């Protein structure tokens, strides 16, 4: 197969994956390919077991219908820009255009590692979360413990989804700096990890391709594809959780990773000259001045109970509002720095930062605008994350599917994949 058809095959698969059920006619329109080429590519993807095709209805099928979080406004597959009307079926008169759906039986293992738990979910190529398991811990797991836990959970979940399913890769999201070339976690302070190889040992243990990325970067990409930032090419994402504040940047429709994959550490943006010393050694980092622990301690709620936190915030207790005021000021300063640096159209706030945003309303955006050059904020929107608690798992799943989406091949079972694992 020549390079161009291979690229087109990946483009079509990515569109079906990201948009959800879509007519073959709509794929022709979105890609700019002729009908015979689209027919051949869809046929190849069906033969590979990656998509299914069914008869369309007389009224047509909306691109992305059936997956509410799919970003049908603009496909990011590099296959041309889908306009706001991309959801219209193009079946025309006569026989309805067949509908193409990604297979739920082609799955990736999505993994998040936190200070208090390792979570693994099996996510179908169609976006369906097939299985999920959480292994809580009283203390941050070592890298070796996390790798073994992931392997055990993947094996357990895979055994439960039936013989027809095919696991194509593992995506691991870690709260720390990750070297993109080899999947080595250079520094994850909340986990206590320094220069820990994760991708290689996990691939050896499972016989599957493994990619390891920073958790906030995966969250940024998931929000760009399926959440509050869907269809937006320039986005800043901040997530506040058990491991501090992580950040990810999407610039010109692509993740901004930097030379080694370390870009986007917005939690360590300087915001307070007389602030608290951070674990990184600096003083006044965003994640020390706006921390989940400080907010939930003032509110008197469990760290992971966002509903309870929102309820207490709604009471406007003076002692809690003082903490809110400090955190809003710190967050606005950090966002000012980010906006002047990368000029995003949308800022997405997740985790406890999303709860904070919903509590204070327009106040964060107002404070940001007051500190920022007017031209930089003309189109700016500050929004809560749209994917909720699943944002990091959705992003990790995208990482697990990356190789398949770039070069579609027939998925193998885990036994077939043993000895063929690749790390990246």
Image (cartoon, helix red, strand yellow):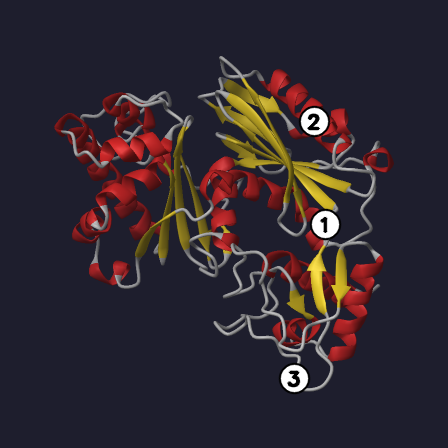
74 sits left or right of 96 in the view: left
SS for dot 3 = loop
Q: Residue at x 31, y 28 (%)?
A: 291
Q: Residues within 10 Å of mark 3 (few under 14, many from 20)?
A: few
Quarter of the view holding residue 203: top right
Q: Is residue 256 visible?
A: no
Q: Can residue 19 be seen here?
A: yes
Q: Are marks 3 and 2 in contact (CB under 8 Å)?
A: no
- Residue 200 vs 227, above or below: the answer is above
For this orientation, the residue located farthest to the left is 318
As drawn, the label of residue 92 is 3
Spot occupied by residue 14 in the image (x, y as percentages of width and height): 65, 58
- Disc 1, SS: helix
Which residue has dot 2 on it? Answer: 202
Query: CA–CA distance between discs 1 and 2?
Result: 19 Å
Numbered label attached to residue 360: none
Residue under circle 1? 404
């Amino acid at each position: 197969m020549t390079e161009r058809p291979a690229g087109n095959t990946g483009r079509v698969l990515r569109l079906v994956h990201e948009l959800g059920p879509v007519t073959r006619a709509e794929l022709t329109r979105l890609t700019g390919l002729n009908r015979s080429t689209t027919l051949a590519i869809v046929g190849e993807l069906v033969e590979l077991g990656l998509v299914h095709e069914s008869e369309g209805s007389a009224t047509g099928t909306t691109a992305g219908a059936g997956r509410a979080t799919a970003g049908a406004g603009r496909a990011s597959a590099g296959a041309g820009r889908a306009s706001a009307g991309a959801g219209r079926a193009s079946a025309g008169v006569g026989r309805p255009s067949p509908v193409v759906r990604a297979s739920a039986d082609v799955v990736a293992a999505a993994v998040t590692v936190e200070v208090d738990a390792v979570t693994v979910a099996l996510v179908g190529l169609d976006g369906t979360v097939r299985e999920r398991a959480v292994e809580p811990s009283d203390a941050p797991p070592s890298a070796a413990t996390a790798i073994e836990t992931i392997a055990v959970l993947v094996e357990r979940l895979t055994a439960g989804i039936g013989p027809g399913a095919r696991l194509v890769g593992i995506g691991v999201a870690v709260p720390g700096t990750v070297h993109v070339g080899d999947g080595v976690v250079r520094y994850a302070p909340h986990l206590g990890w320094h220069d820990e190889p994760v991708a290689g040992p996990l691939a050896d243990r499972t016989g599957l391709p493994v990619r390891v990325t920073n958790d906030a970067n995966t969250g940024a990409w998931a929000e760009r594809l399926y959440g509050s930032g869907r269809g937006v090419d320039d986005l800043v994402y901040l997530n506040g959780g058990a491991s501090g504040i992580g950040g990810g940047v999407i610039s010109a429709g692509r993740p901004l990773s930097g030379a080694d994959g370390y870009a986007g550490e917005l939690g360590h943006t300087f915001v307070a000259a007389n602030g608290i010393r951070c674990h990184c050694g600096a003083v006044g980092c965003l994640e020390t001045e706006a921390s989940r622990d400080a907010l939930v301690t003032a509110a008197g709620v469990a760290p992971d109970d966002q509903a309870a936190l929102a309820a207490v915030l709604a009471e406007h207790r003076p002692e809690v509002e003082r903490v809110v005021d400090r955190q809003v000021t710190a967050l606005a300063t950090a966002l000012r720095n980010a906006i002047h640096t990368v000029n995003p159209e949308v800022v997405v706030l997740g985790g406890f930062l999303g709860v904070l945003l919903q509590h204070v309303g327009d106040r964060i955006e107002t404070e940001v605008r007051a500190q920022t050059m007017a031209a930089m904020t003309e189109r700016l929107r500050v929004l809560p994350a749209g994917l909720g608690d699943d944002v990091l798992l959705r992003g990790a799943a995208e990482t697990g599917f990356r190789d398949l989406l770039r070069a579609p091949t027939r998925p193998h079972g885990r036994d077939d994949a043993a000895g063929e694992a690749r790390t990246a």
